[in-house]
Image (cartoon, rainbow, N blue to C red):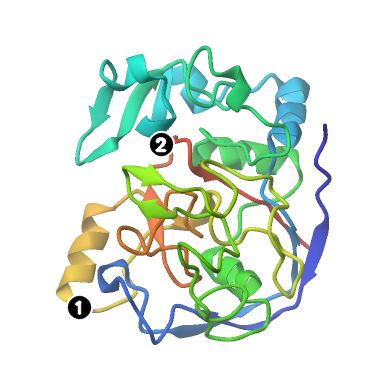
Amino acid sequence: MTTTHQKILIPGGTALVGTKRAFIKVDSESPPRKQKVNEFLMDNVAVANSRFAEFIDATGYQTDAERIGWSYVFVNHLPNADRDTTQMASGATWWRQVFGATWKLINGPGTEDAFHADHPVVHVSHNDALAFAKWANGRLPIEAEWEHAARGGKGDVMFPWGDQEPDDEHFQPCNIWQGNFPHYNTGADGYDATAPVDAFEPNDYGLYNMVGNTWEWTAGAYTARAQNAKARKHAAAMKGSMVLKGGSFMCHKSYCFRYRIAARSANTPDSTTSHMGFRIVYDT
């Protein structure tokens, strides 16, 4: 199965970056600022496994996870025997170092059934995303372009659909966590891990899954926008990391309220996990 992507024209203009309603202030979600952006094209979906496979077949590229030999996998998705034998990540016990975990073997060797052609590719580093973008004659979006596109012309809204917050029981417009993180996910939105790249309703520009499902790499290095000491200290600790946007299927308000447009995270360019992917933009 091949998931067809479409290039959506995103109008240029003044992009809003950040928000007046910051929830995680150390991440420099505020103050909001305005930045001029030119029109550009953006894929309506994140890069799917089927499309990434075309890139691998055409180029013979080896991802960072394949080259290094391991990647981080969410512990609940491991076979029971592997949960007690794999190395925990420092400070985040729900991440396990799994040798042989790659974009094809998402939860490690013997987990071929976790691979779905129409789901977003994961276990891809920032380096891998750049290599794919070059092959696709595109690039990664800057943070201002990503937020501008995610807002869909709605202004300073929390989510691509508006301000109504997802919950655990009645309103699930995106693929995030429902339940008690990290112990139990009810899967009320229909998914325990990733969802197809075109799941749920698109925003007003026709873009799918701009929040939830997988974090998306952007082109920019992480810097502090806020001028308070905590934000500057946090940014200094993140030096060399690249900005990620959108949150993932592991986000829940009680733990990681980062499935909001203005929210941000970051990771080092060679880092790979089972909840980070990307989408491509193109200059007009």
Residue linked to disc 2:
271
Q: Vertical placement of 131 versus 261: above or below?
A: above
- Amino acid type shown at disc 1: Asn
Q: Vertical placement of 240 versus 78: above or below?
A: below
- Amino acid type shown at disc 2: Ser
Which structural element holds mark 1? loop
Of callouts 2 and 1, the N-terminal one? 1
In this rendering, position of residue 51 left or right of residue 253? right
Instruction: From the top left corner, tell me how far across and down residue 220 is, in percent.
Output: 48, 58
For residue 58, say whether it is visible. yes
Crowding at mark 2 (Cα within 10 Å: few <14, some 14-19, many 20+): some
Instruction: From the top left corner, tell me how far across and down residue 211 is, in percent.
Output: 55, 61
The quadrant of the rendering that contains the N terminus is top right
In the image, 64 versus 112, the foreground residue is 112
Residue linked to disc 1:
228
| Cα distance between the residues tagged 2 and 1 | 28 Å
The quadrant of the rendering that contains the C terminus is bottom right
**Residue 33 sits in quarter:** bottom left
